[in-house]
Image (spheres, grey):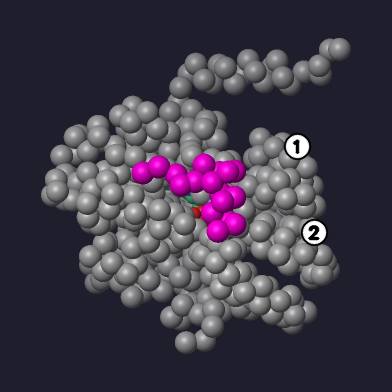
Amino acid sequence: MKPGYYGNWGGAFVPEILHETFRQLNAFFTEAQADPAFWRQYVDLMGSYSCRPTPLTLAENLTRRFGGASIYIKREDLNHTGAHKANNVMGQGLLVQRMGKRRVIAETGAGQHGVATATMAAKFGFECTIYMGEEDVQRQRPNVFWMEKLGATVVPVTSGSRTLKDAINEAFRDWVANMDSTHYVMGTVCGPHPFPAMVAWFQKIIGEEAKEQILAAHGRLPARVYACVGGGSNAMGIFQGFLADEEVELVGVEAGGEGLTSGRHASRLAAIPTTADTDGIPDATPGVAQGYKTMFLQDDDGQMKDTHSVAAGLDYIGVSPMLADLWERGRVRMTAATDTEVMEALQLAMASEGIIPALESAHAFVQAFKEAGELSPESAIIINQSGRGDKDIFTIAHAFKDPSWREFIRAKGEEYGKEPVS
Ligand SMILES: *Cc1c(COP(=O)(O)O)cnc(C)c1O
């Protein structure tokens, strides 16, 4: 198989001017992978800066409620900055240090990857520029605020639809102009090779820990592992711990938005009919964009569609080439959860276990809740809680239509919207 390909998917479709930068990146990455001291340095850093290893929590109340498999939750929400994204950005930070570069750039949609990258840059003392569509800058003000306070320059992108895909183009333009000094921090297991391989390598720490933890707690492998899928990095992270164990079923959960037949969702693989009895709604198709080949939500002319999800982190047109391959080979089952189901699962997780999953992570909870009762009480399942939901308070409170929250927002708007009197 060609390097950087996963079955039919992946590759590295980059402008010629970046070929040397990619050659160098591949060389440093390969060398770091072969150096056990590098991985030790990474594990030490994640231990002292990001609370690793994260716990595996037995959800006793939920287990009792569904009456089937023991439900375990892998707590990526306890990472510094509140999500599994820390695993990737801190790893790439160490690699940037090894390459002797001094500046990092990234694109961000919802702003979570931007905040994680700005945090990493502050810790390592790198210069940092984050590209963000102007629309997103306005929608995600709190994250923009934190990025700037962490020392990053946030550049609002005004071209095209002024969202994530335009930010990606702008970031690539910067990289071409500054490749000697600058590293592009990819946020998920997508993009041109070696990024999917690199991000997956750092994220595999989730699955390695989870496997050891479930064997210690439960005495055997889990029947199923559930993870939400945006680009696919938290899913690939935990799945890698169990890929070789054929008896463990791996379940990805995409953003079903307002339903797979509504035209308002961000489901690439789950929406594809794999058997004759599905509805055959046309959705994602194979394509090459943003430097790699995968299944994209695009129209017949290759124009990217508008996607929708209540969870900003799952609202993406492409999907990891690694997951496209595992799905095509039947190793990963892809499903989708709707916005409504997500709010219900979130409510249940909060009230039963005292944990607040991120809206993204709550997608994985939906599917696990649907299936836990079918499994025998001797079995176990793991839900990857990719992040914490505190960041989502505006969206969650709005979706619950809480009248006192609305009044609170109105009053705060009046109070903070005024010019401060000194
Ligand atoms: C960004 C994000 C995701 C989606 O990204 P993946 O690469 O699919 O993991 C999921 N959960 C949380 C909490 C996120 O911040």
According to the image, label 2 marks what residue?
A: 102
Image: magenta residue range: 40-56
User: What type is the residue that disc 1 sits on?
Assistant: Lys
Say few, some or many: other residues with alpha carbon within 10 Å of mark 1 (under 14 / 14 to 19 / 20 or more).
few
Q: Residue furthest top?
A: 422
Residue occupying the point 43% across, 67% down = 323
Residue 67 appears anywhere in the view: yes
Nearer mark to the viewer, of 2 and 1: 2
Q: Are marks 2 and 1 in contact (CB under 8 Å)?
A: no
Residue occupying the point 43% across, 38% down = 357
Task: Give percent across and percent down for residue 13.
Answer: 63, 78
Residue occupying the point 30% across, 44% down = 72
The mark nearer the N terminus, 2 or 1, is 2
| Up-down relation of residue 37 to residue 350 (above or below) | below
Side (left or right) of 240 relative to 315: left
Which part of the image, by quadrant, shows the C terminus?
Answer: top right
Residue occupying the point 43% across, 80% down = 7
User: What type is the residue that disc 2 sits on?
Assistant: Arg
